[in-house]
Image (tube, rainbow, N blue to C red):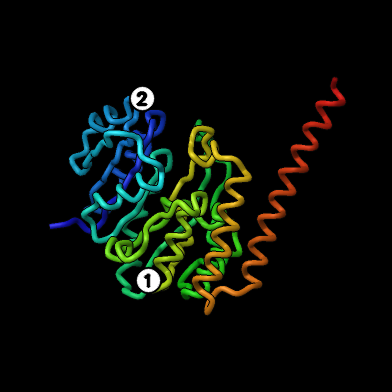
Amino acid sequence: MGVRVSVCVPAFNAARTIVETLESISAQDFDDFEIVVLDNASTDGTGDLVRAFGDTRIRLYTNDTTLPIVQNWNRAIELADGELVKLVCADDMITPGCLSAQVESMADSEIAVVGAKFDVVDDDGVVLARGRGLPGLVGRCSSRTILRTLVQKMPDDVCPTAAFLFRRADFALTTGFRVNFLYAMDVDLVAQLCDRGEFYGHDQVFAINRASVFNYSSTTSSASKFADVVRFNHHQRRQFRDRVGVLDVAIGDGRVLRQVLVRVLARAGQLFGRGLRQ
């Protein structure tokens, strides 16, 4: 018989942070959950740390070879037994009370996904930002509202994967995480899920996102990430013409363009300053 919630933790060379991540999950006040850790053929002892953690709710799986991130995330959820699923990256955390509050919200069958606000910390755990996320998405939101917002905002403005909870049965009806939208693949999944249901956003901080120099996002070029977002925006317009308008896409693309200009100007300033010092 399955458990109520599966917290899935895809991990690759996460020895620096995996224990802290597991501690945040293990400390939840909700009883009926499992922790599914998928070690993506790590070489830094990640699996050994998981085995030594000592929580009987943990099921550890190890890939024979290192899978691409999208394939690994999908496999982590495929290994889950829970009715509800949360995916927590191996350098992120969830806060006390997260599961109990979000499971209660999912008792409403019309809610397809719940999310929450989040804090941001650095590699040393220093808080960089508090109470971020869910722009216009606190409380109950229609499918149209969430789909439009996902296009108008950057993925980092919404909330990290660890802040979401959804039904495993609904996930099985989607295409899962998609390689087409790497930087936006978590919000793309939310869009797929909310095609058939509503979104509920918790005003409390239930997730902690680590702005790490080691994670996938930090090692991916800005150009690639921005291209993923633009591709996502235009796909949503094609997919959901009844709910996502041309103006929504223009707003979203404009936000990407502004971030590109900020990066270009910052880079130009660095080069100019370097030239003055020579």
Q: Closer to the camera, 42 or 88?
A: 42
Question: Residue 208: x, y in percent?
Answer: 46, 46
Which residue is the extreme one toward the left? Answer: 1
Q: Is residue 161 above or below residue 199?
A: above
Horizontally, residue 195 falls left or right of residue 49, namely right
Residue sitting at x 48%, y 58%: 187
Horizontally, residue 41 falls left or right of residue 252, namely left
Residue sitting at x 26%, y 36%: 62
Residue sitting at x 21%, y 54%: 81
Which residue, given by chain and number where applicable, does mark 1 sit on? 111
Give the image quarter of residue 49: top left
Q: Nearer the viewer, mark 1 or mark 2?
A: 2
Which residue, given by chain and number where applicable, does mark 2 sit on? 44
Label 2 Cα crowd, 10 Å radius (few <14 / some 14-19 / many 20+): few
Question: Residue 227: x, y in percent?
Answer: 60, 52
Residue 75: numbered disc:
none
Question: Residue 109: x, y in percent?
Answer: 31, 74
Question: Residue 236: x, y in percent?
Answer: 53, 67
Give the image quarter of residue 85: bottom left
Q: Closer to the camera, 118 or 270?
A: 270
- Callout 2, which amino acid? Asp
Image quadrant containing the C terminus: top right
- Callout 1, which amino acid? Ile
SS at mark 2 in the image: loop
In primary-sequence order, the first of circles 1 and 2 is 2
Q: Closer to the camera, 124 or 271?
A: 271
Q: Is residue 25 above or below residue 176?
A: above
SS at mark 1 in the image: strand
